[in-house]
Amino acid sequence: MNSLRRLILFKNGLGCFERHIVADQEVHLDFRASEIDDVIKSIIVYDEGVKNLSFDGKRPSSEDLAEIGLRPVQGTNALIELLVQFRGVPFRVVTASSEYKGVLTGIDERQEAAGESVLSVSYMVLLAEDGALQSVRLPDVIRIIPDEERAGKDLKRLLEASLYWKATERKKLVVQSAGGELRLSYMLPVPVWTSSYRLLLREADACMMQAWALVHNASDEDWEDLQLSLASGMPMSFRMDLYTPRHRQRPFAELPDKEEYAAPVVGRSYAEPPAPAPQAKRSRAAMAPAAASVGSAPFEADMLYEREEMAFAGASDSFTESTAVDAKASEFAPVSFFKIREAVHIPAGKSSLVPLFTMPIEGRRVALYRASIRKNNPMTAVLLRNTTGFALEDGPITFYSPEGYTGEGMLPALDRDEQVIVPFAIEGSMLVNTEQKSDTKEVHRLYARGGLLFLERKVERRTVYLLRRGGPLAFDKLYIDHPESAGWTVVGRSPESRSEGFVRFCTSAEADEFDVVEQYVLTETLHMQVGSDWLDTVLATGLIQSEQRSLLDGIARLNIQIDEATRREGQKTNDIEEIGVDQKRIRENLKALGSAEEEKALRRRYVAELEQGENRLRSLKEELNEIRKTRESLMTQRGERMDGLSFDFFVDGSR
């Protein structure tokens, strides 16, 4: 019986699978190992009748078997490999003529003659209750039954390890219901459903739109008599490894060595007074049912379960239907749901086109010009407004007129009542040429800020679209997508809209030309700390008033004085360096003189020159210090004037 009843496919690559399980039935659901995390993260049980819900373990089957001392059975001697692993287990062995009981001690190989050849035959060696050993010819055995409950369970685990889903990284979910029909749902990764549209153009503003969805069944299960819903929008989702067991590291502690003591003597002890009664508050331990089986939880857990069930059931029942022709839609949060009226049938590994709706939609024929797509011609397009009442997903759209096929386009995702222009053909009845001119205007703004002067000039660019018609037009509006450049501002017109990299304008299709004027502001920075040439540039604008003129004149005069002080500082510094070089030369000459009489006279002359140089050096350093003080004072005055300078003038007097 097919338990899959309902499926909701989302645009984020997930599908919500809802299954119904009848009372007292056990259902085995097969999943890929990569899907099990999503199942654990999202599974919902809507009813209380769940008796058991379990998954296969994460570990490989070989590790599970190793814990009970077994290994997977492989090869052609599977029975012998199996029996050898159960040495020491009591068995009941049945042949055609008798029955044997005993503990398996091993498998014995014996040589038997078969005509002219010799065959190797296996015998089971059993230890009977009376201590005697019995050999049972294995080819004569009809049944081998473990005579111990634990051995039977281990044998079952060993056989399950060789099942299909174990060998192919498949995981099994076992669901067992009790007491009534059980509903559960979970999320699985699925191929994203895609939509496509057909639009029938009409003379009036109303068109007819037909929408289809392409659904892929990439699972290993046939979707039979399935209630299918398609959800638009993009819910958030993520992957997380919940299936892998996690273990906490704990510190290792050792018991200390115990020393022997004599019997200690301790004083008397007294009981503590009784503690005050605790307040009515549930502890964390009280909230969790202790060792309760599924379906028999305490009252607290039952109440919590009911609240969760009501919440999810309410969300499921709120998917109300619309009056769409071929599909039903409802709006829930930011997602639109298309509920297919008829049950769908999609075999495993197949795809199907599912009709969504056919309904009128507001649309009119226009033309759209974008030079980057077609330089000399606009495109025939349709201005669509989403009047369907729900959001539309993006997808290809094919256009038809009463005469037949007219073209194709791409419909972007549309919210309710949002409009978009969708081109579908080249309009050969209209030619478009463009002309562009640029002009740099005079200074239109002068302002001071942060000790700097700024001049702004406007660069104006005019783009003219020349329109020529070669025949009758089927539209009355032309939309022009003008390229948007960084820093340029459209003036004189208000655009219809903006898109990535374009500004959209609308004009009559009967117009002969359409112009777009843009302006760009060039900013020139004037530094007032250097000379006075900048003052001539500022005064030439004619924007400076008398109050600001006085401040600017004062800054220019201070610049001249600072430049003069800087020149004198450099000159004094050079003089000091020259005297230093000359004195070094004199000292070297003095070292070379001896004690002769004529050398003594030369020595006295050198010493006199040194003294004269020292006096001159001392005087120059004093003058240099005064110059530097004067220069620093002038710079302080200039800085104060520049910091106090603040104005903002426009050519037209506006701000």
Image: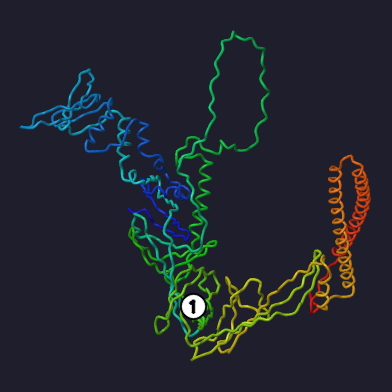
Check disc 1 and report the residue beneath it. 423
Residue nearer the viewer, 610 or 637: 610
For the rendered model, the colour scheme is rainbow
Circle 1 SS class: strand
- Give the quarter of the image for residue 555: bottom right
Residue nearer the viewer, 355 or 80: 80
Q: Residue furthest bottom?
A: 471
Q: Position of residue 454 (x, y in %)?
A: 77, 70
Q: Position of residue 611 (x, y in %)?
A: 93, 48
Residue flagged by tag 1: what amino acid is it?
A: Pro
605 with respect to 491 (left or right): right
- Give the quarter of the image for residue 578: bottom right
67 with respect to 493 (left or right): left
Residue nearer the viewer, 524 or 69: 524
Q: Residue furthest front?
A: 597
Please give the count of numbered marks on the rendered protein.
1
Examine the rendered structure and indicate whether residue 531 appears above or below residue 246: below
Tell me the quadrant of the picture where the C terminus can be found. bottom right
Q: Position of residue 409 (x, y in %)?
A: 46, 75
Q: Residue furthest top?
A: 262
Examine the rendered structure and indicate whether residue 321 appears above or below residue 29: below
Write the residue at 51% across / 46% down.
Answer: 305
Write the residue at 67% across / 12% down.
Answer: 267
Residue nearer the viewer, 332 or 573: 573
358 with respect to 513 (left or right): left
Rate crowding at label 1 as few (under 14), some (14 to 19) or many (20 or more) other CA atoms within 10 Å: many
Q: Position of residue 540 (x, y in %)?
A: 82, 78
